[in-house]
Every structure is written in structure tokens, then in C-alpha cells.
Image: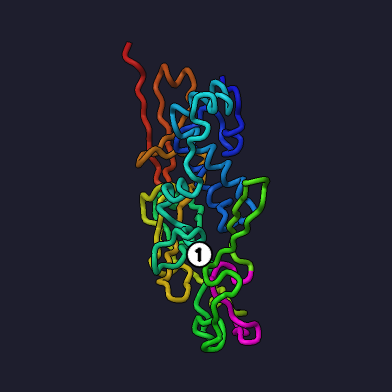
């Protein structure tokens, strides 16, 4: 009996669910509430990460199931959670890195998109067209953001991209708060409004619509990634990032997948169990599979 279902409720799963169910739930929610997509959902993203890390660890899960969050804290693991961003990077392979200063040098942000596919499509393979929005270098100013030579160091942050505020908390006690510079939006440089490019408004990039042909090969699995190298967001002086498609397998009403096997549950009558039976199962590629069971030997 689980004492506290809060973490299960956060992930939208039931106690006793499988590790695959946990991973699938975390993947969906982490992509949806990542701060780069939803800047105002930082607390939600943190809770999702904490819930997944707890329930995916057998020891933490055992303690939580028996005594809830309080038991985790009393057991000495309440403060031992990974950074939500580190967990996300470990899970997705470092995507979304651009928004946190973790981006690899000279590479722009990756664009991650979840693609829902049916079990039939994974079984037979398919080609899907997907329309995405991404950043591209402004062709009017060639990524400068304005006229040539119009860029200057931000006088507010002195080119660091960050502002530091010091608050006096009490006698001999001060607090230092560091935040992104509001004048240059963390860029360390700015362009005089009158010299800004009218096409991109000084942002150096514009939004563009990209249509991709996504080839889903036979046998691909839930959570598998299809990567389009160099097709992601563009930024000045950086190599373009990648577009990463994460496959999301939709639940099938009849078949359940287990690795490369398909499982189907078939109800039979008592007379069929005693006397044998023959049933026809329609496969995912529209073949008729005849299942014959002989009567038990007497």
C-alpha cells in the first residue's frame, strides 16, 4: 500500500507502473514543461524531475512508497536529487542546452519535437511530413542585427551579459543576486534602436517554417530519436544545432509491444479450453494468422 501518491500524480501514472511507463511519462512532461519552452514553469519542471528520479530509483521508491516525502528526508535522501537540467540532459543526450550556458562551443540550440506514431507505423515503417518553426540568420542584415559597426558593448553589464545586485540583509550580512542583463538580454552587446535591422528588430535571427520528411523505419521503438544534423536553430557565429525527433508510440487497442514481440490477450470459453479451438487474428500488416489449440490429452 502506497502512503503518498503525490509523485505518481505529478507524472500521471499509477503505483505499480513499469519503468517504461515512468520513462514515457517523464519524457512527455519534461519536453512540455522545459524552461526553454515554458519559462514560467520552472517549479513544475523541478517537481517532474524530482518525481521521476525518486520513482525510477528502487531504494528511493521503496522509502517513498512506505512513508512519503517525509520518509525520504528522514532517510537522508531528501536533498540528494540531481539538478533537473542534468537529469534532462542525461535522459535526452544534452538537448536544449543553449538556454543555460551549457551549449557546446560554436553550436546553436537543438530543436526537439515529439512525434506521435501508431504501432502499425512502427511495425510497417512510414514517412511523415512534419512542419516546424526554427530560427534562421536574418538575410537582410546577415546576422548583424543592424548596420555595420552599429553593435556596441552593453554599458549596463559591461559586456558580461549579467547584472549583479547586492542587498544588505543585516549587520555584516549581504546577499548577492545575479540575473540576466535586461538591457541586452544576456548578449553582452546592444544596438542603438535607430540602427537596428527593421526585418529582425535587432534580434539577428528570424523565425522560419521548415517541412521535414521523417522516415520511420520498421521496428523503431518508443522514445527512439531521429536526428537531422545541422537543421536546428541558427545563431550568428555558431554552427546550426540539430532537429531531434522523439518517437512517441500511441497505445494500441489490441496489441501490446514488448521489445520486438507483439502480445495479444485472447479470452476463450471453458468449452474451448477443454475441447480445443481455432481462432483467426488479423496482424498489423493485414495478414490473417490462424491459431489452433488442440484439446488436452485425456
The quadrant of the rendering that contains the C terminus is top left
Residue 81, image x and y in percent? 49, 38
Residue 295, image x and y in percent? 36, 19
Q: Looking at the image, which residue sits at the far front? A: 171
Depth check, front residue: 87 or 139? 87
Q: Is residue 105 above or below residue 272?
A: below
Left or right, 85 with respect to 168, comes to: left
Residue 94, image x and y in percent? 42, 54
Q: Is residue 39 above or below residue 155?
A: above
- What's the magenta bit mostly, secondary-structure-wise? loop
Residue at 49% x, 84% y: name it.
142
Residue at 36% x, 25% y: name it.
293
Q: Is residue 181 visible?
A: yes
For residue 199, which quarter of the picture?
A: bottom right
Rendering colour mode: rainbow
Residue at 31% x, 14% y: name it.
297
Left or right, 227 with respect to 83, comes to: left
Q: Is residue 186 magenta?
A: yes
The quadrant of the rendering that contains the N terminus is top right
Q: Is residue 69 above or below residue 31?
A: above
Residue 271, image x and y in percent? 46, 18
Q: What is the span of residues highlighted in magenta in the rendered image? A: 183-199
The residue at which mark 1 appears reads as 130
Residue at 55% x, 81% y: name it.
152
Give the structural element (helix, strand or loop) at label 1.
Answer: strand
Q: Is residue 23 magenta?
A: no
Depth check, front residue: 169 or 183? 169
Q: Is residue 106 above or below residue 223?
A: below
Q: Looking at the image, which residue sits at the far top? A: 298
Depth check, front residue: 83 or 260? 83
Amino acid at each position: 500500500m502506497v502512503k503518498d501518491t503525490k509523485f505518481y500524480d505529478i507524472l500521471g501514472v499509477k503505483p505499480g507502473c513499469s519503468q517504461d511507463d515512468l520513462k514515457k511519462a517523464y519524457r512527455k512532461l519534461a519536453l512540455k514543461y522545459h524552461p526553454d519552452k515554458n519559462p514560467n514553469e520552472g517549479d513544475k519542471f523541478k517537481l517532474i524531475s524530482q518525481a521521476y528520479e525518486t520513482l525510477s530509483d528502487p531504494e528511493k521508491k521503496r522509502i517513498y512508497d512506505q512513508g512519503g516525502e517525509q520518509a525520504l528526508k528522514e532517510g537522508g535522501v531528501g536533498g540528494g536529487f540531481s539538478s533537473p537540467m542534468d537529469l534532462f540532459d542525461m535522459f535526452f543526450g544534452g538537448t536544449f542546452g543553449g538556454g543555460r550556458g551549457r551549449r557546446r562551443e560554436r553550436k546553436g540550440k537543438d530543436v526537439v519535437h515529439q512525434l506521435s506514431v501508431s504501432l502499425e507505423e512502427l511495425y510497417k515503417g512510414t514517412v511523415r511530413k512534419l512542419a516546424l518553426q526554427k530560427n534562421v540568420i536574418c538575410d537582410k542584415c546577415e546576422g548583424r542585427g543592424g548596420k555595420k559597426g552599429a553593435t556596441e558593448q552593453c554599458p549596463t553589464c559591461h559586456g558580461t551579459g549579467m547584472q549583479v545586485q547586492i542587498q544588505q540583509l543585516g549587520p555584516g550580512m549581504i546577499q548577492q543576486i545575479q540575473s540576466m542583463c535586461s538591457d541586452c538580454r544576456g548578449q553582452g552587446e546592444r544596438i542603438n534602436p535607430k540602427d537596428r535591422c527593421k526585418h529582425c528588430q535587432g534580434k539577428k535571427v528570424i523565425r522560419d517554417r521548415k517541412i521535414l520528411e521523417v522516415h520511420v523505419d520498421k521496428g523503431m521503438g518508443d522514445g527512439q530519436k531521429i536526428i537531422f544534423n545541422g537543421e536546428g536553430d541558427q545563431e550568428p557565429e555558431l554552427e546550426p544545432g540539430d532537429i531531434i525527433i522523439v518517437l512517441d508510440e500511441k497505445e494500441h487497442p489490441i496489441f501490446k509491444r514488448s521489445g520486438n514481440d507483439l502480445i495479444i490477450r485472447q479470452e476463450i470459453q471453458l468449452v474451448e479450453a477443454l475441447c480445443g479451438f481455432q481462432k483467426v487474428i488479423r496482424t498489423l500488416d493485414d495478414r490473417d494468422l490462424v491459431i489452433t489449440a488442440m484439446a488436452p490429452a485425456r
